[in-house]
Amino acid sequence: MEKKEKIGVYVCHCGTNIAGVVNVAEVSKWAGENLKDLGVVISRDYKFMCSSLGQELIQKDIKEQGLTRVVVAACSPHLHEPTFRTACKGAGLNPYLCELVSIREQDSWVHTDKVAATEKAKAIIAGGVSRVVHNEPLTPLMVPIHPATLIVGGGIAGIQAALEIADAGTPVYLVEREPSIGGHMAQFDKTFPTLDCSACILTPKMVQVGNHPNITLMTYSVVEKVDGYVGNFVATIRKHARGIKEADCTGCGICWEKCPKKVMDNVFEAGMGNRKAVYVPFPQAVPKYPVIDRVNCTYYIKGTCKACEKFCPTNAIDFAQEDEVLNVQVGNIILATGYDIFDARRMTQYGYGRLANVYTSLEFERMSNAAGPTGGNIVMRDGKTIPKVVGIVHCVGSRDKNYNEYCSAICCMQSLKFAHLVHERTGAEVYNFYIDIRTPAKGYEEFYHRLLDEGTHFIRGKVAEISDAVRLPGEEGKLIMQVEDTLTGNQLRVPVDMAILSVGLEPRADSKALAKTFGISCSADGWFIERHPKLDPVATMTEGVYIAGCVQGPKDIPASVVQGAAAAARIMGKIQQKEISLEPIRATVNADTCSGCRICNNMCPFNAITFHEDTMVSEVNPALCQGCGTCVAACPAGAISGTGFSNIQILSQIDGLLLLTLDKKKEAALA
Amino acid sequence: MKEYAYFPGCSLEKMASSYHQSAMETTKKLGIKLKELEDWNCCGATTYFYIDELLAYTLCARNLAIAEKTGLDVVAPCSACYKNMYFTAAHLKKDPDLAEHVNFALEEDGLHFNGNVNIKHLIEVFASDISTEEIQSKVSHPLKGIRVAPYYGCQIVRPQKEKENVEQPQFFENILSAIGATPVNYPLKMRCCGGSLIISSRTAALSMVRNLLQCAVDSQASVIATACPMCQVNLEVYQQQVNLEFGTNFSFPVMYFTQLIGLAFGINPKKLGIGKEFVSFAPSLLPVLQE
């Protein structure tokens, strides 16, 4: 027979958040009187339980009354469970003997009927009290943290994170899929709202990454697999064969100068220009070593050519080079894999791909870039005509129920930047077609006003169609943008020479696969989900895996840099601690009752279950397990139990929740 | 041999008899049988649905119920008939209450509609049920060098039914290519011909017709191909009035796509109803007609 527990119940007012709907005094009094049988020896209510005074109240009772269990009825455990558990620990009680039940999110915030909400609060507390009796004292698991960090994605967010962590003196592996780091930012000409040159501010950071003694840069590489858990991940990285011996290559550029094969560059030049079959994507590429594109290289197609090899002064070309697969051990991971742009072809009414002078924003970025295919000249597809009228369409693929419902955040400012550049370089008349102008950051609104002063036309309306069907005099040879000006209520036909579609941002096409590799989750849109949208924006629900930049959602360069640095700070904090305490809420397999059916093996979202072929039983790796309970529910033999969520705990809680109902039935039966 | 239940609709009885003739001839050549629905009635056309929706659905459902008994897919050559029948079937399937009301009325006629019938536009039969190769194999007189404006009109693809491309479909172009013609880029191919607006708001409708004709001229087409009797009439018959209204000088042939296919198949032009048109096809089609 177990010893009688002494339980304290603490009901929080949360100002009026709870007390405005739930009669807390009545609830507290009821618990003190009616839950005595379950072991409640004291029940109090207090204005803010989470305040120091509230916590001290609990600590005092633990010490003076000898409480062995604590139930706090307040907000969601997501918010204050650590607060109250720490308070209990401070008073010498094992923190896992404290249970936080939510009478705010699950009661006062969602109900208006005060009487019913008060009754519900009683039921919730009765459930908590019934459960806490069966709680066991637990000790957090301590695991050491490997000091190295893996960063996937070498755009501005990944670069920032890598530099922060490397500067702090710990090693970083930076893995980038393309031949060079730099990401989308390297493709841009100017950055809003200051109009400073994108390359000028980015390339110094790229060079730092390339030279940093603490950064191992792996470009033209992908992460294939990740095993392990926070503090002890092992990542399998495939370095694609560049066809270049990096030790010998000086990056002199003779190979791509001599290469006879021109290839349309659909990645860096966005289809606006060519590169060679052996290439670096852009002159300031880091690392400086080129890559042989085996799909297009004449040698790989026909078996002859080898012009690059012939002319290479250091014999650095190696056609036989093979992919290299290596394993690295890291303690933490940052995913900063960025975004894809919305495929403008999907909105056929805008004619992209069909009407020559309709451009995407990325194409325009390349065109306006001095190092780009037109040398920075803003010209039409014929390569020489300077447009006289240019129309810029906002929200292409964004804020649209047919495509993506979300706002892509950067397009307004990007469109304003384009308008300015067109105006400055060609003197053309510029029309911006917008739904709403969104310029909510430092200096952005001022930039918008600058554009208004420059005489850019702003037409509030979603463009219905871009067409080459001319009707009225003056439209010959133009593109007609059909739009309703919703401020005047008029239908307009605006003839333009060039249309620029400010396309939205989308998750990478392979984001779901990537999320699976790293054991984290995507939202329905495909963006990676942060642990908390406001208070923990760079961590994920998987310990040790962080996200930064557009992989988490559309954002501009400043916000991506902030997230890169934030993720780095979080990780450096962890590395400093040398070891990490893991929640002891874990699943365990009872080896005696496990039938070895392996159903749980594939179900585990964290790959925490291994099957022992010799003993024919499955085992949960406690450091990997996140305590989600999937395997517990799935085990047909009932051989898996979740610490902190045992059957008796759950069933007792349900009994407690139903206590009031049962009492009422009893009363009715007696009456 | 493929067989369809054929709903000609009122237009094809008289005004668009050349569409009916050419549809019959070309499908026959392809081994398709169009079996006319027995005792069919009007589809409700463009107006009835705005006057009494329930009765309009009932009118349409009567044809659907008759078709359902045949167990065949129904084919309508007219875009308005097709749209009315398609959406009546869709609404009745979605709304059991409406179906109950409609079926209550149909019982008077000993009919019942269960919702088990596929409705197709005639052009869909050529675009998806028959392969391009099958069409090509029957072509004896390819329409080489003949520039055709593929005029879809608004009701074949809209309202959107599933996820199909309603902005820039290509199936009409593919059919025209299969018979050797050159489909031109016809930017207004999805625009409305004015429909019955020609009766209620003549000037507005004439302006729409003018735009379509001007666009065909600008696209350097020599003939407009249509798949709807309403479009055909508006575009062809009202050209004189457009010319009077806007001072233009249009004389532009507008043909049914089945007539073009028939010519490419080497069918006698008379059998395709060619010769009944207001604006002669002859100048644009001379090379083919001569053969």
Image (spheres, rainbow, N blue to C red):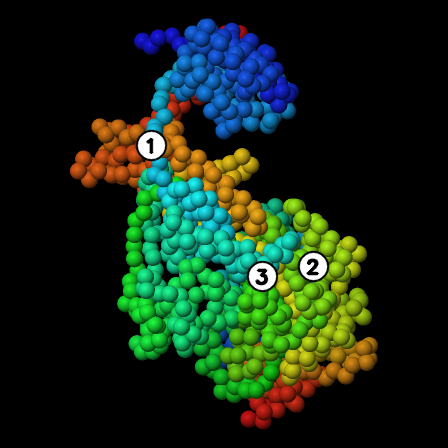
Q: Are marks 2 and 1 on the same chain?
A: yes
Mark 3 / mark 2, whichever is N-terminal: 3
**Which percent across, then down, holds residue B61?**
61, 57
**Badge 2 amino acid:** Phe
In this rendering, the answer to whether B131 lies above or below B106 is below
C-alpha span from label 3 to label 1 = 46 Å
Locate residue A103: give its quadrant.
Answer: top right
**Which percent across, then down, holds residue B111?**
57, 55
Marked residue chain, label 2: A
Q: Nearer the viewer, residue A482 or B61?
A: A482
SS for callout 2? strand
Of marks 2 and 1, the one in the foreground: 1
In this rendering, the answer to whether B68 lies above or below B284 is above
Mark 2 / mark 1, whichever is N-terminal: 1
Of marks 3 and 1, the one in the foreground: 3
**Badge 3 amino acid:** Asp
- Residue, disc 1: A143
**Which percent across, then down, holds residue A78?**
49, 29
Marked residue chain, label 1: A
- Residue, disc 3: A189
Q: Assess disc 1: are there few (<14), some (14-19) or many (≥20) residues with their C-alpha within 10 Å of its C-alpha.
A: some
- Residue, disc 2: A433
Q: Assess disc 3: are there few (<14), some (14-19) or many (≥20) residues with their C-alpha within 10 Å of its C-alpha.
A: many
In this rendering, the answer to whether A422 lies above or below A262 is above
